[in-house]
Image: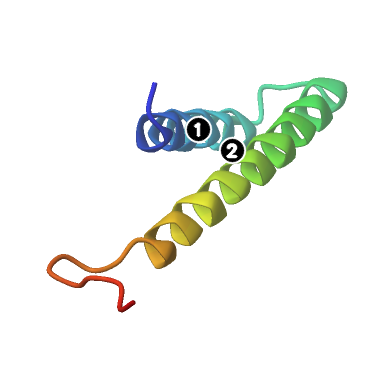
């Protein structure tokens, strides 16, 4: 799975969790656990986004070469 695909999956999971939380059908313990899972997932997604951004910065733009 590529990083972009993994990020898309993370977004989908966060959206589903938000729907569950808004629905109000969870117990307090289940909601707290879901919020903790979301925080971990969001942290992981942020790290992946940072990694992608750094990779794009280090890669030269198309048609641009490194000067010697």
Q: Classify residue 34 by image quadrant.
A: top right
Q: Which mark is residue 22?
A: 2
SS for dot 1: helix
Q: Nearer the viewer, residue 60 or 46?
A: 60
Q: Classify residue 60 by image quadrant.
A: bottom left
Q: Residue at x 42, y 35 (%)?
A: 3
With respect to residue 23, does 68 lie above or below?
below
40 sits to left or right of 46: right
Q: Give the total of numbered labels.
A: 2
46 sits to left or right of 31: left
Tell me the crowding category of disc 1: few under 14, some 14 to 19, or many 20 or more residues within 10 angstroms, Cα based: some
With respect to residue 35, does 68 lie above or below?
below
Q: Residue at x 50, y 33 (%)?
A: 10
Q: Residue at x 57, y 43 (%)?
A: 45
Q: Are the residues flagged by discs 1 and 2 in contact, CB closer than 8 Å?
A: no
Color scheme of the displayed model: rainbow
Q: Nearer the viewer, residue 63 or 68?
A: 68
Residue extending furthest toward the left: 63
Q: Which mark is residue 41?
A: none
Q: Nearer the viewer, residue 15 or 55?
A: 55
Residue extending furthest toward the front: 68
SS for dot 2: helix
With respect to residue 44, does 63 lie above or below?
below
Label 1 – label 2 distance at C-alpha: 18 Å
Q: Which mark is residue 10?
A: 1
Q: Position of residue 54 (x, y in %)?
A: 50, 60
40 sits to left or right of 8: right
Q: Quadrant of the N terminus?
A: top left
Q: Nearer the viewer, residue 54 or 24?
A: 54
Name the N-terminal-most of marks 1 and 2: 1
Q: Position of residue 31 (x, y in %)?
A: 76, 29
Q: Quadrant of the C terminus?
A: bottom left
């Amino acid at each position: 799975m590529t990083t972009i695909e993994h990020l898309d999956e993370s977004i989908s999971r966060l959206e589903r969790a938000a729907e569950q939380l808004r629905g109000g059908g969870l117990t307090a313990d289940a909601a707290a656990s879901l919020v903790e899972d979301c925080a971990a997932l969001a942290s992981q997604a942020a790290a992946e986004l940072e990694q992608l951004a750094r990779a794009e910065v280090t890669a030269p733009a198309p048609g641009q070469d490194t000067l010697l």
